[in-house]
Structures are given as structure tokens and as C-alpha cells.
Amino acid sequence: MKINTFQGGIHPPYQKDFTAHKATEEAPLPDRVVIPLSQHVGAPNEPTVNVGDKVEEGQKIGESEAFISAPVHASVSGTVTAIEERKNFAGRAIKSVVIEVDPSQPEKWNEKRDTGSLEEEEIRQAAKEAGLVGLGGAAFPTFVKLSPPSDKPIDLVILNGCECEPFLTCDHRLMLEKSEEVVAGLELMMRAVKASKGIIGVETNKMDAIERLEGLTSAKNDIEVVPLEVKYPQGNEKMLIEAVSGRRVPPGKLPSEVGALVQNIGTTVALYEAAAMGKPVIERVITVTGPGLKEPKNLLVKVGTSIDKLIEHCGGFIASPGKVIMGGPMTGFAQEDLSAVVVKGTSGIVVFPSEDVLEETERQCVGCDKCVDACPMFLMPNMIVKYVKTAQYDKAELYGALDCFECGCCSFVCPSRIPHVAYVRIAKAEIAAAKKK
């Protein structure tokens, strides 16, 4: 079996065994949900409901007229008790709709329609009305990705089944438990952009998923399952495109430049559900896991559910928690407040006990160039850090600060424990500020 990959990257401890074998469970209904009106890249939404309104599950409660945006919907039936700013998982104050949950929830989304005859625009509109965004964490509106410019035709749609972040297994479970929906969603995407080829890239630590998907696609001449080396960040779209097709996206360009479109597994399933059932993004599968948790699980969670409720459902902490991360440990956000809620782009919650969290002090660079060897974008993170420290942001830009996608490989391998990604974020902010002047 040929196994594809890309140049660079790292092999962190993957720690998938906590939950890879555990079927997805439905998380208990919370007493209230907090729905941020901005859960995507692009223009924020304005509320379409008022305090005191009764809302139904799936009802649109926020929208924007901007092209790059995505509406949000009530994830439960209940009563709007507040519309106010709440801190999100990244610590930013976001206008949010608070809904008190009704004890009885009507059953919905049981009827499916045949999606085989849907036209391109119908598929795009289904994605738009569902508020669908990249559920792998990027949160870019899917409707926009399915509307490529006419001068950038797409002939290849790639599904990211890598799930290369340590600990997370929610996409793995979806590939096993909703494999038919994965394939049907891929076919919808291919039809929406008129692509002639579809590829599902899956790392070889998920052989059961590879075999399941190969069984469903073996008779399809236009869809292929490609096994990939277990390596981080295999799932980044530029790395994935190169690994499965040999095409290399030029620096500063989008995948459409090489005729490719990349989508996450969860996004693909959600597109099928939007097209077949009219179901908006009101819930998603996430992995709640880590060595600091009593009962790690894969959970189907309502958007707007707080972290503390999910930790409680997983048996609580084993001991005093040292760090709770929303997302994966490589690219996620450490949480100060466990009342922060799950949003569309939340893929996991990882808990570490205090004894596993080391307070490390940044030391002087020793010039080992390990960060350069590990960088999958062929950048020189050491030089970017050097110029950020001396406030020479123009030189940091010359060394590719804007091309960095913040995977964290450089920080992971650095013997001096330099937080390269933090310096890159400073560079990006300063470069953006300078260009606004």
C-alpha cells in the first residue's frame, strides 16, 4: 500500500487511544445555551430575535447581508433570556443570544429528501441557509468556498480525514458511524463546483475508516481513498493537497490557484444533512478527552453548551486540572473560564492534570535550526522571531510571517522553548496595522 505525505512536519505523541474506540454519545441537554452571533470568518451577525421571544430548534437567530458570513441558529427550543456580550473561547467579547431550554424538545430532522438531483445553486444555498462553516476549526463559510471565481475552476475536491491533532477522534468516529453521509456529502461538493475527481485522505492510524470508505467508493471511478502517513500537520490544506495530488499551492495563494478545494469530514457530513434534511449547524461531534479527565468520550453536543457541563458529563476531573484546552493541544486555546461554550468550529476539549503542565521559561536561541527543518511551509521561524523581537516587522514579513498557518511545529521542537507562534501572531498584527495606515 502506497502511503503519501509531505515534506517537513513532526510526530508528537498522538494519544488517540483515550477515545478512538468509543462510539459517539449524545450529550445531555443543558439548562441553557449561549449562542455567539459570530462563529465564523467574516462579518458578524445581528440578532433577528428579541429578549422574551420563544424560539424553536433550528430557527435562525442571527444573520448578516455580507457575502462572507454565516447565519446562526437556535440549537434548542426555548426562550431568549438575554442578548448580551459574552467572552468566547478566545477571550473576545462577542454579542450572544442566551436561550433558556424548554424541558421538552420536539423531534426534528427525521425526513430526508433525495439529494441526487440537486443543482449546483441548490447545494450552495443549502450550505448558506444552514450557516455551514469549516468545522475543523477554520470556520470559513462553506457557501463561499463552494462559489469559486470563474477564472479559478475546481477539478479536485479533497476531504481531510487526517485528524492529525493529538487526542482528537471526532472525525474518525464520523468516518465510521456516518460513512455513507461522508461520501454523499463529497458528491454534493463535487457537483457544486463541477469537480471531476474526489479524494478522501486518511492517516493510516485509522485503517478501519480507510477500509470502510474504500468499501463504499470502490465502484466509483471519480472518488479515491488515499492512505497518508501519520504526521502532523498532515491535515493542513496545503500539506494535504501536496500529499494526495502532488500539486503545490504557491505562497500567499489559495487552493483554488491549483484547482483544488479542501473540506473537513464534519463539514461534509453537515452539508449532506443540510441538503437532505434542511438541518442547520446546531450540533456537532466533539472529543472530550485527556489524562486529566475521568471518562473521555466522543459526544454529539448542542452548539452553545458550556465546557463545564461537558466535563461534568465525562465524570469530572481526576485531580486538580492544570490546563483545559478548547481544540487540540497544538492549535487550541487554553481556557481561563470553563463557562465558555462550544461553537461550530470546536473539535475537542482536552484536559491535562496539573502535574502534566510544566512552566517553562523561554531561553536564548541556540541556532540549532530544528524549527526550520520542521516547518512544513519551508519558512525560517527563527528569523521571524529575531525580527519581531527587534520590532523589524517588515523583515519578518520578508521571511514569510504572513504565510505561517500557526501549526506550532516550530515551538514543539525548540529546545529553547521559544513560543514561535506567539511571535508570529505579533508580527501579523503589526504588519496588518502598518498596512492600514
Image (tube, helix red, strand yellow):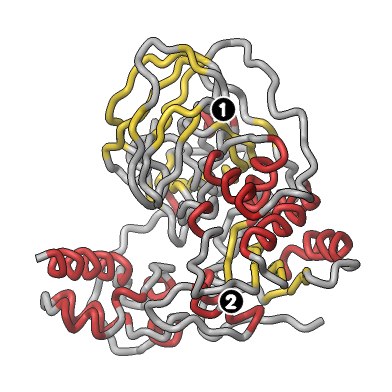
Residue appearing at x 53%, y 53% in the figure: 142
Compared to 271, does 397 lie above or below? below
Q: Which mark is residue 15?
A: none
At mark 1, the secondary structure is loop
**From the viewer's perspective, is the residue at label 2 or at label 1 nearer?**
1
Whole-percent x, y for residue 8 in the image = 51, 83
Q: Is residue 352 left or right of residue 340?
A: right
Q: Is residue 169 visible?
A: no
Q: Which mark is residue 241?
A: 2
Check the picture and name the quadrant holding the C terminus.
Answer: bottom left
Residue appearing at x 42%, y 30% in the figure: 35
> Mark 1 — residue?
58
Pointer 2: residues within 10 angstroms few (<14), some, or many (20+)? many
Reading the chain from its start, which is encountered first: label 2 or label 1? Answer: 1
Q: Is residue 241 visible?
A: yes
Whole-percent x, y for residue 331 in the image = 43, 59
